[in-house]
Amino acid sequence: MDTKKIYLTEEGLGELKKEYEELTKVKRPLILERLAEARNQGDLSENAEYTAAKDELSFLDGRIDELEELLKQATLIKEEDKKVNGKEVVSLGSTVTVHIDGAKEEFTVVGEWEADPTEKKISNKSPLGQALMDKAVGETIEVEAPAGKVAYKIVSIH
């Protein structure tokens, strides 16, 4: 993995740490136990349980390695207001309320690893996230979407 910063909210960092603990302290020992039991059953070449446990362990170790790298590179998003010329602007961790064609939508701008459109968490690297960054209340931005340009007017930042 490269050594770029991975921006996470406190909640996102907590979830990654929780997953890491679960995998290393609970799931991995269980798979190792399954592997040992399967190994004791004899002929490994025809032992489906042994092969399945070995594959699962390999997959799990890959995820553990990935999480270790993420945690090393994690940079916590500070929950402080960002101001430019005395105005509060959108930054990482901001929750932004926008008007789109008369409808109100609320998004939280997060790092790419935490983005989840179903929870209205958008990446700062996404087209909408990039367009919102450093903008203030009252500004209107346009974002290219599959259906054409969409205008978003920033109503509030918190």
Image (cartoon, grey):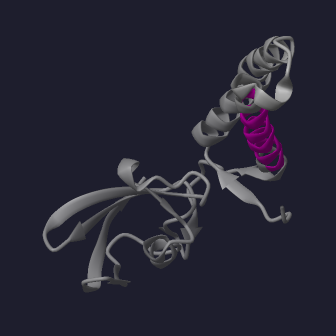
Q: Where the N terminus falls, by quadrant?
A: bottom right
Q: How many marks?
A: 0
Please state which of residues 12 and 80 is positioned toward the viewer in this rendering.
12
**Outermost left residue:** 102
Residue 19 locus on image (x, y percent): 67, 31
Residue 129 locus on image (x, y percent): 48, 70
Vertically, is 138 above or below 68? below
Residue 5 locus on image (x, y percent): 77, 61
| Left or right relative to 146: residue 91 | right
Please state which of residues 27 and 34 is positioned toward the viewer in this rendering.
34
Residue at (75%, 25%) from the top-left corner?
Answer: 47
**Residue 37 colored magenta?**
no
Residue 137 locus on image (x, y percent): 36, 69
| Left or right relative to 148: residue 78 | right
Q: Which residues are magenta?
A: 53-69
Vertically, is 64 above or below 50? below
Main structural element of the magenta stretch: helix, strand or loop?
Answer: helix
Please state which of residues 35 and 19 is positioned toward the viewer in this rendering.
35
Residue at (81%, 12%) from the top-left corner?
Answer: 41
Residue at (78%, 23%) from the top-left corner?
Answer: 28
